[in-house]
Amino acid sequence: MVNFSDPLSPREREQKQIPVLSPEFAKRRAHRNNSKHSEIWNILDRVFDPELPGLTIWDLGILQDVQQIADQWKIVVTPTYSGCPAVDAINQDITSELAKNGYNNVKVAITLSPPWSTEMMSPKGKSHLRSINIAPPDENDLVNCPVCESSHTKVISQFGSTACKALYQCEDCFEAFDYFKHF
Amino acid sequence: MSKNNQNLIRLLIGLADDSVVLSHRLSEWCSNGPYLEEDIALSNIALDYIGRARMFYQYAVELEGEGRTEDDVAYLRNERQYTNLLIHELPINDFAFTMVRQYFLDVYYCQYLLELCESTDERISAIAGKAIKESRYHLKRSEPWIKQLSEGTEESQQRIQNALEELENFVGELFLMEDWEKELVADGIAVDREKLQNNWNQQVQSFLAESELKFPDSQLQIRGGRNGIHTEHLGHMLSEMQYMQRTMPGLQW
């Protein structure tokens, strides 16, 4: 629904706002910036979630740590949902991406604590979701249509194509879309 | 192996069995849901429970240290070796029954896992911290369903009422403690489930009262799951679930 009293679209309004970093993401970013292994972190920026095209494991928030133990590289990731079937594929992608760059002794470790939350996502990750027509997580579950930006949306099912998404429909443009659940 | 470790493994296998059995039941709705979105939702919840079962099984076989894998435990034990609480294994029946059971268990897990987060065993506490977020989300979905069905048509009301009556004898077991589990409570590892019953009753009764439903407080408590004594249904379910590994041992995807 176009609101004539406000000349800005929700997206424009969002862009005008000063971006607020979640404390969870700020903590991850500080940890990464203080790490001695920036080369490894940068290589891992080429590993993507298999079910969210173009979203890196860093931006999704599941890449937690890079450690060097003797001559082995330990990559620590946390799963989004406990039954997430993408975990095995992500582990393989991490190992093969690092191998391509000459790091062959790699171990991927899973951590459960602290549990993953959408607050760990990067702001870039959230805006990327919107660009692939997935509504990004919102802490009040206020969901705007990623196509026409209308706030006039309804939930169709609390579970969408994967466990991390819910299915919504826009009541203005009728587009059915995924909402990345705030979790 | 110390007695304490034995008890801990027993606890972990029991929790894993609860999850894997319920997960299989939920997955039976796959391609049979009332409509596509429900189908997907129930399958997704099943997936959450599979993940939960795997985390508990993996920890249990690591502690055991006898080379068993999570798959061995799930696929190669018979019904008398399964130790799930009985409510998880009841057949899916109709959609109303599935949702009432889910609602009961969602309320239960939201309370149980919250306590389990305080476990002195760090790994258990981490698993609980992960799982409780999922159960809270499940509850957000099962609550409105109970409301919708119980305030819907005469038929949906009747089906909800039937489900409540069928489940009444199986709820009590959720709150019955075994002696070995009490020992783990004393060590701060496990949760005293007996203490959860009042809160559970209160939350469920007041929610059902909003829709003018009553959950009969049954005196008859069917029990035995944690000791491998099951209803007739589990064996049938396992024969379906374990079919592939039993016919072609060691088969992998």
Image (cartoon, helix red, strand yellow):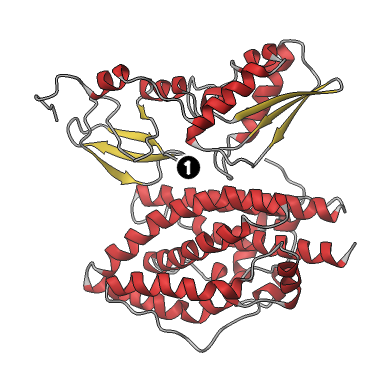
Q: Is residue A15 above or below residue B99?
A: above
Visible residue check, residue A8: yes
Name which residue lies at 67% across and 38% down. A111
Along the line of sight, which residue is nearer the eye, A87 or B173?
Answer: B173
What residue do we see at 23% from left, 25% from top?
A148
Q: Amino acid at mark 1?
A: Ala
List the single residue furthest toward the right: B1
Q: Is residue B70 visible?
A: no
| Count of marks, rendered view | 1
Vertical placement of residue A131 versus B120, above or below: above
Which one is nearer the viewer's eye here, B29 or A13? A13
Give the quarter of the image for residue A16.
top left
Locate residue A169 relative to residue B53 in the image: left or right: left
Horizontal and vertical percent position of residue B81: 74, 69
* Left or right: residue A175 compared with residue B236: left
Instruction: Please give the name of the residue rendered at 52% of the width and 63% of the height, measured from the top-left corner.
Output: B111
Q: Which quarter of the rendering shows the N terminus of chain A?
A: top left
What percent of the width, then of the height, locates residue B3?
86, 67
Residue B227 location (% of width, % of height): 71, 76
Q: Quadrant of residue A8?
A: top left
Residue B229, quarter of the rendered image: bottom right
Q: Residues within 10 Å of mark 1 (few under 14, many from 20)?
A: many
In-image side of A125 versus A89 (left or right): left
* Identity of the residue drawn at 77% across and 62% down: B8
| SS for dot 1 | loop
On screen, residue A22 above or below B186: above
In the rendered image, residue A82, in percent from the top left (x then y), is placed at 58, 45
Residue ID for mark 1: A163
